Image: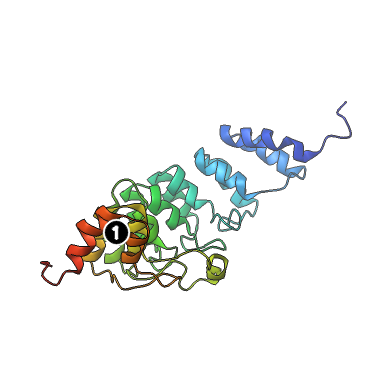
Amino acid sequence: MCSDSLDIVDLHDVIMEAIHLGRVKFVSLLLSYGFPMKPSFGREAAVFKAKRVLEYFLGARWDINEPVNVLIPPVLYYAAYAVTDVEMTSWFLEHSANLNTSCEVDYTPLSYAIRNARLSVIKLMLDYGGDVRKGQLLQYTVCRDEGLEDIISLLVERGAPLNATIYQDSQTLMRFYLISLGTALHTATEQGKTNAIRLLKHLGADTEVKDANGDTALEWAQKWNKAEMFVQIFIPILSPNHPR
């Protein structure tokens, strides 16, 4: 006989494996015996493309738009960010996943997609109603390793606020008041992304906008001794004789 001390919570690894394998009946059996539904189950099903398991969760009244936790938005972000898959992203969108639902620090599923997903996934999310004014999208785009120019241009074309400072309108600003929260141009300076700086300036980024501590992007370059960036980009841009 099974020990009376066995707790249903001890079966966490078992249900996770069942999700990975797409074993809907076994997952439903465990949940029917009182195993608590968790956002992480939806995350795992998204990563392993277990659509039948996800459909069961929805039928069991799982909230597809519940943030995973205070720092992680709803599980749609895993389809776009971790899987970077158009098909899975489409599945979530077709099943009422909200692109603009954030966690407590203004990260949306689109925020995560912007950092890693293919351009086709990002375009799909925007076409489904992704709000370019939420989620600090330009700042996260600058952090990409590839394709950042195309995505910056796309976001600005769709109306992303070019000179907004991070968390400018967010209730979470006070959590980060000691951090120098700046614009996408500040982030590009911090990251050493000269291509992003040139493009942002070309698109109309204002070099005089200050971060939460009162510093411009140019002052960031000076403060962190980014001499090459200062000489090659900021001085030519700020010079009145520089061709625009």
The quadrant of the rendering that contains the N terminus is top right
Q: Could you say which is closer to the camera, residue 15 or residue 185?
A: 185
**Residue occupying the point 48% across, 51% down:** 77
Q: Position of residue 112 (x, y in %)?
A: 44, 53
Q: How is the image coloured?
A: rainbow
Q: Position of residue 206 (x, y in %)?
A: 28, 71
- Say which amino acid is labelled 1: Ile
Q: Residue at x 34, y 73 (%)?
A: 209
Q: Position of residue 30 (x, y in %)?
A: 72, 39
* Between 225 and 175, the one nearer to me in the picture: 225
Q: Is residue 139 visible?
A: yes
What is the total number of numbered labels drawn onto the structure image? 1
Mark 1 element type: helix
Residue 229 horizontal/vertical position (percent): 26, 55
Q: Is residue 150 visible?
A: no
* Quadrant location, the C terminus: bottom left
In the depicted view, which residue is nearer to us: 126 or 90? 126
Q: Residue furthest top?
A: 1
Crowd band around label 1 with a 10 angstrom C-alpha radius: few (<14), some (14–19), many (20+): many
- Which residue has dot 1 on it? 152
Residue 37 position (above or below residue 172): above
Q: Nearer the viewer, residue 192 or 150?
A: 192
- In the drawing, does residue 117 fall left or right of residue 152? right
Residue at left 29%, top 59%? 152
Vertical arrangement, residue 84 with respect to residue 173, above or below: above
